[in-house]
């Protein structure tokens, strides 16, 4: 393995990767840099070449210039993919096959089906792994926020989502729309079992289990439910209700990929659908 470059060199390449990401016009803004020592061999960003990821583009550019990237370092703002569901060869495989010796990662993929899988593939194939500096991780996260928020927040009067409830503190924010200041509910979820999950409120008395109801239309007035529990157990197919000053969000649990201690395979997620019911201004919370 090559010696680790000086911190200022790492920082310069990480910064360049973020700058590449900011050029992207896609919803997943990712930038990548291949460097040897202080020299940048190639760089790219998602969307620069249709259909290719940022890492693929950087490797493609290096190949076009007949540059040998064996033993070089890769700096990428988002964890390389490792489980492509298309005919695409995953980026982690391309990186390892190219002989890249080190990979610096800005953020791990928030997709529960991908999270740290790219890291694992690279580790298992002899690539030394590093993280971006904390402030540059934040800049990389900001650059890719439109992609990241897909797994941490959702909007719409009725919609659905799938997210990893062991990440982001189990938080998933549901809003009426994407406008700043829109009525929202910060739901929280945590491990319970293979067929149920705990739904949390920010303080006691704001979450209810609509026991036996399995369709939103079966719930007439959500305030009639018992909001005395801080963390009711919501089984698959059941509905949990969170309320605040804006009204209620009804969340139906569709599916759970449990943690390993409950028979999970390594990917952890909960899939929900929701319906928002706004409170009439004249009807305060009792």
Image (cartoon, rainbow, N blue to C red):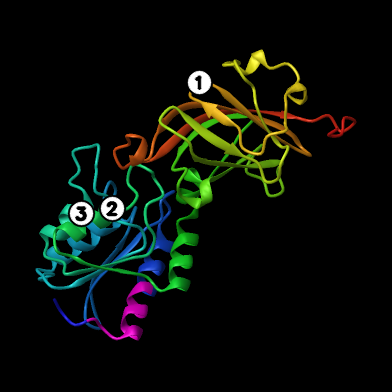
**Residue, disc 3:** 121
Mark 1 residue crowding within 10 angstroms, few (<14) / some (14–19) / many (20+): some
What main secondary structure does the magenta stretch of the protein show? helix
**Start-end of magenta stretch:** 4-14
Q: Provide residue 123's location: percent of width, then percent of height.
A: 20, 60
Q: Nearer the viewer, mark 1 or mark 2?
A: 1
What element does badge 2 sit on? Answer: loop
Q: How many angstroms separate mark 3 from mark 1 (CA)?
A: 35 Å
Q: Nearer the viewer, residue 164 or 209?
A: 209
Q: How many angstroms separate mark 1 from mark 2 (CA)?
A: 37 Å
**Residue, disc 2:** 53
| Quadrant placement of the C terminus | top right
Instruction: First in sequence, mark 1 or 2: give its number.
Output: 2
Task: Name the residue at 26% across, 53% down.
Answer: 118
Q: Residue furthest top?
A: 218
What element does badge 1 sit on? Answer: loop
Q: Report whether residue 60 is seen.
A: no
Q: How many angstroms separate mark 2 from mark 3 (CA)?
A: 17 Å
The verdict on residue 31 being magenta is: no
Snapshot quadrant of residue 38:
bottom left
Q: Report whether residue 41 is seen.
A: yes
Snapshot quadrant of residue 69:
bottom left
**Residue, disc 1:** 237
């Amino acid at each position: 393995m090559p010696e680790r470059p000086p911190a200022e060199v790492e920082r310069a390449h990480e910064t360049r990767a973020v700058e590449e990401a900011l050029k992207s016009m896609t919803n997943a803004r990712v930038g990548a840099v291949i460097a040897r020592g202080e020299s940048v061999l190639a760089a790219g960003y998602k969307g620069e070449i249709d259909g290719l990821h940022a890492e693929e583009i950087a490797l493609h550019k290096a190949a076009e210039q007949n540059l040998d990237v064996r033993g070089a370092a890769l700096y990428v703002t988002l964890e390389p993919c490792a489980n492509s569901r298309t005919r695409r060869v995953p980026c982690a495989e391309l990186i390892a096959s190219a002989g890249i010796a080190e990979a610096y990662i800005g953020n791990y993929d928030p997709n529960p089906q991908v999270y740290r899988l790219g890291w694992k593939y690279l580790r298992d194939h002899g690539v030394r792994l590093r993280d971006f500096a904390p402030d540059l991780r934040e800049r990389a996260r900001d650059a890719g926020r439109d992609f990241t928020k897909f797994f941490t927040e959702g909007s719409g009067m009725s919609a659905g989502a799938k997210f990893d409830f062991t990440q982001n503190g189990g938080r998933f924010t549901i809003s009426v729309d994407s406008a700043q200041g829109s009525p929202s509910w910060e739901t929280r979820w945590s491990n319970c079992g293979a067929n149920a999950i705990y739904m949390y409120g920010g303080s006691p008395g704001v979450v209810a289990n609509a026991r036996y109801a399995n369709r939103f239309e079966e719930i007439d007035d959500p305030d009639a439910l018992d909001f005395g529990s801080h963390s009711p157990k919501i089984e698959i197919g059941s509905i949990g209700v969170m309320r605040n000053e804006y009204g209620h969000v009804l969340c139906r649990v569709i599916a759970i990929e449990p943690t390993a201690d409950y028979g999970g395979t390594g990917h952890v997620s909960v899939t929900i659908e929701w319906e928002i019911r706004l409170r009439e201004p004249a009807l305060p919370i009792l």
